[in-house]
Image (cartoon, rainbow, N blue to C red):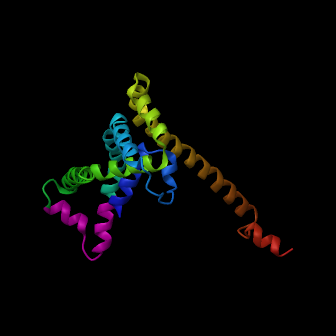
Amino acid sequence: MKGISIAVAAMLAIAPAPLLAQTPTAPVSPDLEARMELAREIAVLARAEEQLDHAFERLRPGAVSNMLDQLMRVSPARDIGAEIESRYPGGQAGFEREFSRRYAEQFRTHYPEILEEIAHYWAQNMSLEELQATAAFFRTDLGSAWVRLLPSVYQNMTALGRQYSLQAGIVVAGEMMNAFDSNNGGAEPAEDMEGTE
């Protein structure tokens, strides 16, 4: 399941936003193969493999930590952390480094499949003319400059999303706790209160 989640997240890093909402399978078009060829070229021009690398590196630390948590849940009677620390060369830090290295290698073996899926999505949802225009843009200096910025753009978007989501959460939690305290812990959900009037 984690591998699928990583792959999906990585795909989103280079795919257009509509990928979030999959469309029904469209009938095979006579120019589908021509569109597929262009979509594959776009994936190369957009340095899709590099974008996948960047996306994976952002997700990898959490994946390693989650893996260790899962090991401990599967064998609750065993102190997996203590066993790794005492028996694995380099302890838990060594285990995490080796897992992280092997995990990256294993994930990258799926790049051809992931890129083909992305190309297929583009080919199914863009016309031949749109794909030709997109490829032409990526062949230009401006297109190359845009591609170079993609990793930092997504990194900044992620950081800003976390920052403002945290701020929003703090504000809402504060408002709810203030309302709760002002009612001496007896506040009821608004819809329930309205129903008693």
Quadrant of image for the N terminus: bottom left
Looking at the rendered structure, the number of numbered marks drawn on it comes to 0
Instruction: Pinpoint residue 86: horizontal percent, then vertical percent.
Output: 16, 62
173 part of magenta stretch: no
Judge by depth and name the residue closer to the eye, 6 or 42.
42
Q: Main secondary structure of the magenta part?
A: helix
- Residue in view at x 57 percent, y 44 percent: 164
| Residue 117 percent location from the top left of the image | 36, 52
The image shows residue 116, relative to residue 41, as above or below, that is below
Residue 63 horizontal side relative to residue 130, left or right: left
Give whichever of 195, 130 is nearer the camera. Answer: 130
Q: Quadrant of the C terminus?
A: bottom right
Which residue is the extreme one toward the right?
A: 197
Query: Which of the two residues, 68 or 140, is positioned nearer the viewer here?
Result: 140
Q: Quadrant of residue 151?
A: top left
Q: Residue at x 20, y 56 (%)?
A: 95
Which stretch is magenta?
66-87
Outermost front residue: 30
Name the outermost residue toward the top.
141
Nearest the eye: 158 or 51: 51
Residue 69 rendering spot, x and y as whole percentages: 33, 64
Residue 75 counted in the magenta span: yes
* Residue 113: percent from left, percent from top: 30, 53
Residue at 38% from the left image edge and 58% from the top image edge? 5
**Is 98 placed left or right of 126 in the picture?**
left
Instruction: Write down the quadrant of residue 173 in the picture.
Output: bottom right
Give me the residue at 64% from left, 50% from top. Answer: 171
Q: Is residue 159 above or below residue 28?
A: above
